[in-house]
Image (cartoon, rainbow, N blue to C red):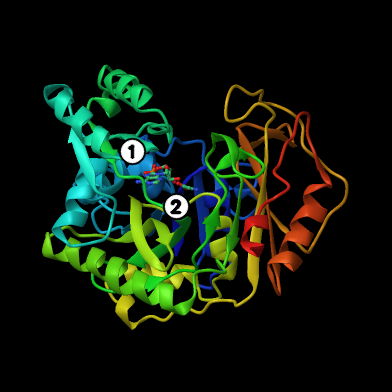
Amino acid sequence: MNVLLLGSGGREHALAWKIAQSPLLEKLYIAPGNAGTASVGTNLPISATDFEEVKKAVLQYQISMVVVGPEDPLVKGVHDFFLNDADLKKIPVIGPQKYAATLEGSKEFAKNFMIRHNIPTAKHFTVTAENLQAGFDFLSKQTAPYVLKADGLAAGKGVLILNDFEEAKKELQQMLDGKFGAASKTVVLEECLKGIEMSVFVLTDGEGYVILPEAKDYKRIGEHDTGLNTGGMGAVSPVPFADKALMDRVEKEIIKPTVEGLKKDGIPYCGFIFFGLMNDNGTPKVIEYNVRMGDPETEVVIPRIKSDLLQLFVAAANKTLSNEKIEINPFTATTVMAVSGGYPEAYEKGKTISFDEEFTDSIVFHAGTKLENGEVKTSGGRVLAVTSLGENKNAALQKSYKNIAKIHFDKMYYRRDIGADLDK
Ligand code: AMP
Ligand code: GLY
């Protein structure tokens, strides 16, 4: 079968790398892809949100499945576009429809879903310009830090965690005044959860599900979790504290009620669900839902999956996932992200990337790269993710760090402490 994958990041390179290994695959196309995906498939110069161009490509290249990497095309309704088009409606899309994607697209929607289905999460209060005073009252009953979230998608920047009450009040006002545009016309205030974060992923067809390996992401730009939030600077899978007892609770208290809740609410779902969780001493709570895989988590999750991912996608499309088992490699995977100097603030693009030598004991997943006249150049903040597998975390990290040191581009930066907190 021919598959079209939408997206252009490290997540998409990892998905493409895995799909390309499937005996079910004839040809893989990636729109728009990056310099890395070009090595495992054919890149098409099409934006993932230009649905008319996506349609043309699907018909031209006889695509029989579309896999959606990022949230943007999902929240904009790419799956619905397929279902509503006579030529496309039989072509399965891995990724939920627009309404289900609201689980990621609106924090308020996600909160109400969790309350309705008894899924543990932080207490919250929703504020608009109409009930600002009640919002201040909710804040005054919380202890610092104060958690303020733009309801809508704000390019990963819409969450503020503030220590000072007066500052929290001021920021709340500014958010409602449009600090994050339309996304913060509604603000969700939350109780601040304590504990350690982790990411759990399932692939579901709305009936059955398979649980993918869990991962821990490192979001801050600076070592020891300091500085600004980024898309993610590295990841580790498995997560040492995610023992069987915790994962059993995650499945029973969070995964099952979520999949059953979707069904009860009559919301079809075919695709990934990413549970951003807080583990408070063995008690898991949902921080957020995403309707896609995480990045850079995918770069450690996918290499640990032994099963044929495309076969799992076919089962999801046929609603037979409950008959499938997923086989996981017990080794640890680590990834370390090389980013452009200045990221997550302003940074330069177009830097030539060079490698001292070929290496075989890590996989380099491309994130923000592009091919220009045969040369690989930087084209984003997060540039390359160096993933390694090892018998344990330190063995994997040693390979990732040895190999990232062989990669060079002007002003390249990476964190040297990925996974270090997990030794405690
Ligand atoms: P979100 O976009 O909802 O995942 O929030 C971004 C980040 O803010 C999360 O990854 C957490 O680190 C933090 N965060 C969000 N909500 C809470 C909460 N209720 N308690 C503590 N930390 C939170
Ligand atoms: N790494 C977090 C995310 O993909 O949202």
Foreground: 345 or 309? Answer: 345
Q: Which residue is mark 1?
A: 51
Q: Secondary structure at mark 1?
A: helix
Q: Position of residue 386 (x, y in %)?
A: 70, 52
Q: Position of residue 59 (x, y in %)?
A: 36, 48
Q: Number of marks in the image? A: 2
Q: Say if mark 1 contacts mark 2, CB within 8 Å.
A: no
Q: CA distance from mark 1 to mark 2?
A: 13 Å
Residue type, label 2:
Leu
Up/down of 242 relative to 222, above or below = below
Foreground: 15 or 26? Answer: 15
Q: Secondary structure at mark 2?
A: strand
Q: Position of residue 75 (x, y in %)?
A: 29, 41
Q: Position of residue 286 (x, y in %)?
A: 33, 56
Up/down of 126 relative to 396, above or below = above
Up/down of 95 relative to 342, above or below = below
Residue type, label 1:
Phe
> Which residue is pictured at 74% across the width and 34% down the height?
412
Q: Is residue 178 visible?
A: yes
| Farthest residue, direction right | 356
> Which residue is pictured at 37% across the width and 63% down the height?
284
> In the image, is the residue at mark 1 within 8 Å of ligand 2 by its beta carbon?
no
> Which residue is pictured at 33% across the width and 38% down the height?
51
Labelled disc at residue 4: 2
* Crowd tier of the residue under label 1, counting other residues whose Cα lies within 10 Å: few below 14, some 14–19, many 20 or above: some
Q: Quadrant of the N terminus?
A: bottom left
Labelled disc at residue 374: none
